[in-house]
Amino acid sequence: MAASNASSFLFALLVALLLFASMQIFRSHLAASQPMTIAGGFMGSLVFVSLLTAVSNFEMNTFGPNFQARVFPEVVTCLFMSMVCCAFVHRVCVTTCVIFSMIALYYINRISASTYASSVGPPTGYATQKKQK
């Protein structure tokens, strides 16, 4: 059973805040070694995904169910906020956060396209039959 936009917004925002808080609590551990800095960047990408989910659900709740998140205000803002969260931990976390976030954004876009794409076939009508002759 799917959650409503409002409850999904609150849940995603809570997850983003908990991830940010855990990154701050374990800041010294995440900056201690190279594998942990990569793990910090991965946690930052999870912050990005949950922030993007929260923003998108808030907009769908406010502007209607057909509203879609776009690249410029929503995705760029959420990516910048997750990069700032990672910058509090380590500089390398920012780089790995961007890489992991772009990979996650690609797969989110792919899943969204396969789920919500319209299944309209090629146009068949008088105009297309006339061009073929």
Image: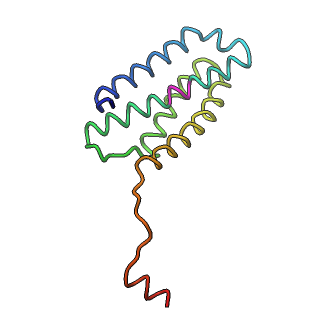
* Residue depicted at 55% across the width and 15% down the height: 23
Which portion, as a residue range, is magenta? 44-48
Q: Quadrant of residue 119?
A: bottom left
User: Is 86 located above or below residue 110 in the figure?
Assistant: above
Give the quarter of the figure containing the N terminus: top left
Task: Identify which residue, 116 or 80, lies in the foreground.
Answer: 116
* Residue depicted at 60% across the width and 17% down the height: 89
Q: Is residue 12 left or right of residue 64?
A: right
Q: Is residue 77 left or right of residue 33?
A: left
Q: Is residue 21 magenta?
A: no
Expressed as whole percent of the image width and height from the top left, the position of residue 47 reads 50, 26
User: Is 75 located above or below residue 87 in the figure?
Assistant: below
> Of helix, strand and loop, which mostly describes the magenta segment?
helix
* Residue depicted at 45% across the width and 22% down the height: 16
* Residue depicted at 49% across the width and 31% down the height: 49
Q: Residue furthest right?
A: 34
Expressed as whole percent of the image width and height from the top left, the position of residue 125 reads 37, 80
Task: Identify which residue, 123 or 85, lies in the foreground.
Answer: 123
